[in-house]
């Protein structure tokens, strides 16, 4: 039985996976493309008690991400936010902040895979770790073959992409729908094959 997709990757794993530096991940997080998270024990931010998974601002602990590799392995986290909120909370207890280790800084697996898909990064072949595309391309392909059998080859590539987008919308919760650019990249070869097939039939 195949294991489910991984929930978390450490930033070290992601850096090795993408062939980049921790500083790059910090930069992408700062620009809002990735959320670096960690887990903390019960901590007070004023009168609000926070525990568990929190998002951190990498610029608050930027020495940990030095490209030269001389940065500290731990730092005191003085502000954070929960995944449900957009406002930052300032740690008041413990007064020195929450101690975090670079080894405990994580990215959600789903976000890693979407980032790879968006930026056309080469993913490692999925195996026992459950590392795979966040999109059900196999299910879409089967449905599209049935569509061709019942209704014929789409009249245009735009129609084909529209049908595929509709399928993903109908078979997801709305969060797992690939962009038109992503679909186009995945079906380029298929559309070329179908176009050649139509030419052969016309000839």
Image: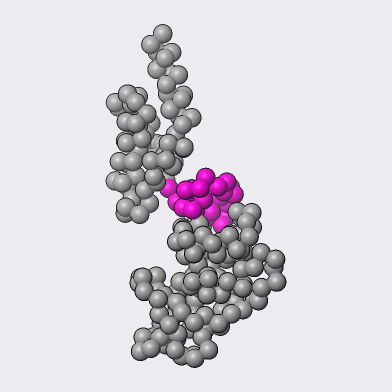
Where 144 falls versus 131 (above or below)? above
Residue 110 rendering spot, x and y as whole percentages: 46, 58
Q: Quadrant of residue 73?
A: bottom right
Residue 166 rendering spot, x and y as whole percentages: 30, 41
Lateral position of residue 47 relative to residue 68, left or right: left
Furthest toward the top, the residue is: 203
Residue 90 rendering spot, x and y as whole percentages: 43, 82
Identify the image's colour scheme: rainbow, by chain, secondary structure or one colour.
one colour
Of residues 48 and 62, the one drawn nearer to the viewer in this rendering: 62
Residue 118 rendering spot, x and y as whole percentages: 47, 48
Q: Quadrant of residue 61?
A: bottom right
Of residues 92 and 50, the one drawn nearer to the viewer in this rendering: 92
Magenta stretch: dominant SS?
loop
Residue drawn at 45 percent across, 19 percent down: 196
Q: Which residues are magenta?
A: 113-135
Lateral position of residue 61 relative to residue 188, left or right: right
Where 158 falls versus 79 (above or below)? above
Of residues 136 and 59, the one drawn nearer to the viewer in this rendering: 59
The magenta stretch spans residue 123: yes
Of residues 203 and 47, the one drawn nearer to the viewer in this rendering: 47
For the image, the number of numbered tags is: 0
Residue drawn at 53 percent across, 55 percent down: 130
Residue drawn at 29 percent across, 26 percent down: 151
Where 35 falls versus 183 (above or below)? below
The magenta stretch spans residue 166: no
């Amino acid at each position: 039985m195949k294991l489910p997709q991984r929930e978390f990757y450490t930033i070290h794993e992601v850096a090795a996976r993408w062939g980049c530096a921790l500083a790059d991940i910090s930069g992408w997080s700062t620009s809002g493309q990735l959320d670096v998270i960690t887990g903390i024990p019960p901590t007070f931010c004023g009168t609000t008690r926070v525990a568990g998974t929190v998002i951190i601002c990498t610029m608050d602990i930027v020495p940990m991400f030095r490209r030269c590799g001389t940065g500290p392995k731990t730092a005191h986290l003085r502000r954070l936010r929960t995944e449900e909120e957009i406002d930052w909370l300032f740690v008041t207890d413990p007064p020195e902040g929450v101690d975090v280790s670079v080894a405990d800084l994580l990215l959600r697996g789903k976000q890693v895979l979407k980032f790879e898909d968006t930026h056309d990064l080469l993913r490692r072949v999925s195996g026992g770790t459950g590392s795979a595309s966040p999109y059900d391309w196999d299910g879409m392909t089967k449905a599209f073959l049935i569509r061709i059998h019942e209704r014929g080859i789409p009249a245009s590539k735009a129609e084909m992409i529209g049908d595929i987008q509709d399928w993903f919308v109908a078979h997801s919760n709305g969060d797992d729908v690939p962009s038109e650019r992503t679909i186009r990249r995945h079906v380029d070869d298929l559309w070329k094959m179908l176009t050649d097939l139509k030419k052969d039939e016309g000839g």
